């Protein structure tokens, strides 16, 4: 932005903040330094229009209206109560949280937005240290679809996007009335009413292809009162948590360190002439346990339960019989 | 932050910023705004030319300069910063919520107080449109590891630890000089100089099986640089292996979990990908566990290794006294 334009815009903000009357464009042209440079009416209006757009994009609340019934055109002013950030005073530990939060995003766009929020907080007198030598550095990953979907949630607008399912090549355009955005286990989901399925659905944002289009008008979508967004993504948390079962395995001597560190050795035992130990281990989910144990091949053999031994056997058998060469 | 695009917001914020800090050093103010002191001086000179209609000596913003400090003596009515836009408030508040849900970074109560104050000052409480939940609770052993790591970082102490390396499936003891802790997607990592490997390494906290904070001062070499994690924690390296795989519908999820480049959609909902891996033994374990729902097109030797491991495994299990139908 040129110095002349920056100066003109600052003067415009100051003039509109200091007036109770609506100032007409003509009045602004005659008063605020910089506009006199416009050589024609057309040049002035073009300049003034661009300036209004610039200020509105920054979030400056320009009000339009007429100060008296005798005014023939609308004028402008800025209501101080809408312009000014409210009083804020952060304790040291609260300010430390803000200092970390502004560095949390991995997206340049969100980092930039958090940064401009920080500039305003500092201007409100808050001291925030972001010098960066913090010993703990959290990061939050986002998807390109995150910002448009969140905007739609906040404006109450439906969205349309192309989506592919996790387990097939199917790609389909979906129309969603979004109720919220949920981060669960480090992944982002859009949750809402799926117009095509006529039911509540969640969509993983990393599977959205291309652009998210906001359709409809603001306020069209309203989340049902008290809806449990997290529950829709995570399912019933009591469902699979806490179901522990104990398994006994044979491990080859000095092998399968990943299993060994979670297991308790019961005693030495050879299997097919190979020295090793029998161990006991607590498992939470049989299916992922079978995958994990099968990965160790001949270094880990399931002794019991039988159902786990069978699942592991099936996996290995499929490979041994058919191979995995394409 | 780009200085040019940010100039007008900065100009609008500068006067209230200076009002709150009479006599502040120009260098300090420049650092807070992430610009050079020269740029900040230019901004101040510009503001000095601005003011209220009339634009006489008593109407313009007035600043008094010292050799290296500045004080606002007339603010022309610009006493408070512009309120946060909806997007700015969201970016900051969602980040704060993520912090409140991440164990061990900050006192969650302080984060929640900050959220409440910012919501109240920005005049629009953010809607309930965002929920952040790590989904995985930090286990007690990991929480205790995290506290010890934080203690070592705070007091700059070396650490002795027993660590499980998932890629090579090995447990090793090593002494490290902690540099920082990262928390990504709910997992905590210690970045440290590893004296054994003589390099900077990333250690996942839940894979540290034993930890001892030593009395010895942490002393990472001065040239030990923290990793650039902007491309993720495990950026591609030239020594990584590559495989071309065909994923059955049941294993398409791999394309999202691992470092894969999607090549072709095939009949029957199968997907051909190129996948990068750091360690071949790790890759063999992964493929063995997937039990034939993934086929390997390249390299052929990888497919052969997986198959011979499967055959060996069946032979060994065949030595069990129990017969299976």
Image (cartoon, coloured by chain):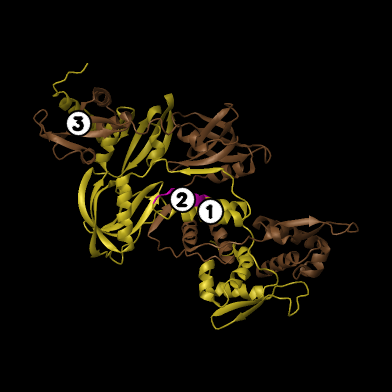
The shade of chain A is brown
Residue numbers of the magenta segment: B94-103
Would residue B98 be counted in the magenta stretch?
yes
Instruction: Check disc 1 and report its element: helix, strand or loop.
Output: helix
Image quarter of the N terminus of chain A? bottom right
Q: Residue at x 13, y 24 (%)?
A: B319
Q: Position of residue A146 (x, y in %)?
A: 53, 44
Q: Position of residue A190 (x, y in %)?
A: 53, 38
Q: Chain of mark 3?
A: A
Asked whether the viewer can see residue A304, the reply is: yes
Q: Position of residue A95 (x, y in %)?
A: 49, 61
> In this orientation, which residue lies closer to the viewer: B255 or A140?
A140
Image quarter of the C terminus of chain A? top left
In the depicted structure, whether residue B143 falls above or below residue B59 = above
Q: Which residue is mark 1?
A: B115
Alpha carbon of mark 2 to alpha carbon of mark 1: how far?
Answer: 9 Å
Determine crowd level at label 2: few under 14, some 14-19, many 20+ residues with C-alpha closer than 10 A: many
Instruction: Check disc 3 and report its element: helix, strand or loop.
Output: strand
Q: Which residue is mark 2?
A: B100
Instruction: Check disc 2 and report its element: helix, strand or loop.
Output: helix
Determine crowd level at label 1: few under 14, some 14-19, many 20+ residues with C-alpha closer than 10 A: many
In the depicted structure, whether residue B24 falls above or below residue B228 = below
């Amino acid at each position: 932005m040129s110095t002349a334009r920056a100066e003109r815009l600052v003067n415009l903000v100051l003039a509109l903040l200091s007036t109770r009357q609506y100032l007409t464009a003509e009045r602004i042209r005659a008063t605020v330094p910089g506009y006199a440079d416009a050589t024609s009416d057309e040049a002035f209006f073009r300049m003034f229009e661009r300036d209004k757009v610039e200020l509105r994009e920054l979030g400056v609340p320009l009000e339009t209206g007429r100060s008296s019934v005798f005014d023939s055109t609308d004028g402008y002013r800025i209501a101080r109560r809408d312009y000014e950030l409210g009083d804020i005073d952060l304790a040291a530990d609260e300010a430390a949280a803000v200092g970390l939060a502004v560095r949390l995003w991995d997206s340049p766009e969100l980092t930039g937005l958090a940064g401009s929020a920080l500039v305003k907080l500092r201007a409100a007198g808050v001291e925030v240290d972001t010098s960066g030598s913090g010993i703990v550095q959290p990061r939050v990953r986002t998807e390109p679809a995150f910002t448009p979907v969140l905007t739609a949630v906040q404006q109450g607008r439906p969205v349309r996007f192309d989506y592919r399912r996790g387990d097939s090549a199917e790609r389909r355009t979906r129309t969603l009335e979004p109720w919220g955005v949920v981060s669960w286990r480090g992944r982002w989901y859009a949750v809402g009413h799926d117009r095509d399925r006529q039911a509540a659905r969640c969509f993983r944002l990393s599977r959205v292809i291309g652009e998210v289009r906001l359709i409809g008008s603001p306020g069209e979508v309203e989340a049902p009162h008290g809806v449990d967004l997290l529950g829709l993504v995570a399912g019933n948390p009591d469902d699979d948590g806490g179901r522990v079962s104990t398994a006994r395995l044979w491990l080859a001597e000095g092998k399968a360190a990943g299993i060994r560190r979670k297991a308790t050795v019961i005693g030495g035992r050879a299997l097919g002439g190979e020295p090793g130990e029998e161990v006991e281990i607590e498992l939470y989910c049989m299916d992922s346990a079978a995958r994990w144990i099968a990965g160790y091949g001949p270094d880990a053999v399931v002794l019991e339960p039988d159902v786990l031994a069978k699942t592991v056997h099936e996996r290995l058998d499929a490979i041994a019989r058919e191979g995995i060469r394409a | 932050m780009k200085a040019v695009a940010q100039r007008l917001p900065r100009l609008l914020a500068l006067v209230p910023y200076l009002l709150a800090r009479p006599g502040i050093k120009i260098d300090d103010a420049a650092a807070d705004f992430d610009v050079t002191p020269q740029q900040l001086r230019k901004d101040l000179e510009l503001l000095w030319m601005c003011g209220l209609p009339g634009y006489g000596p008593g109407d313009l913003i007035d600043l008094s300069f010292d050799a290296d400090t500045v004080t606002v003596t007339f603010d022309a009515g610009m006493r408070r910063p512009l309120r946060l836009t909806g997007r700015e408030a969201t970016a900051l508040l969602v980040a704060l919520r993520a912090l409140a849900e991440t164990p061990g970074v900050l006192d969650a109560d302080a984060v929640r107080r900050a959220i409440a104050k910012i919501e109240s000052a920005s005049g629009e409480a953010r809607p309930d449109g965002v929920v952040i939940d790590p989904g995985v609770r930090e286990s007690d052993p990991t929480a205790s590891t995290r506290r010890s790591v934080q203690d070592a970082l705070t007091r700059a102490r070396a650490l002795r630890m027993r660590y499980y390396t998932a890629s090579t499936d090995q447990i090793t003891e090593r002494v490290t000089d902690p540099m920082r802790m990262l928390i990504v997607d709910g997992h905590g990592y210690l970045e440290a100089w590893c004296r054994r490997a003589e390099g900077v390494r990333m250690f996942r906290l839940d894979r540290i099986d034993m930890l001892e904070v030593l009395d010895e001062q942490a002393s990472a070499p001065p040239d030990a640089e923290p990793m650039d994690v902007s491309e993720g924690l495990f950026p591609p390296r030239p020594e990584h292996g590559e495989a071309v795989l065909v994923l059955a519908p049941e294993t398409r999820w791999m394309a999202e979990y691992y470092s894969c480049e999607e090549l072709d959609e095939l009949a029957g909902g199968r997907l051909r990908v190129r996948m990068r891996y750091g360690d071949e033994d790790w890759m063999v374990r992964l493929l063995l566990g997937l039990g034939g729902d993934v086929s390997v097109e390249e390299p052929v030797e990888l497919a052969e290794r997986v198959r011979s491991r499967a055959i060996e495994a069946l032979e060994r299990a065949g030595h069990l006294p129990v017969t299976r139908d």
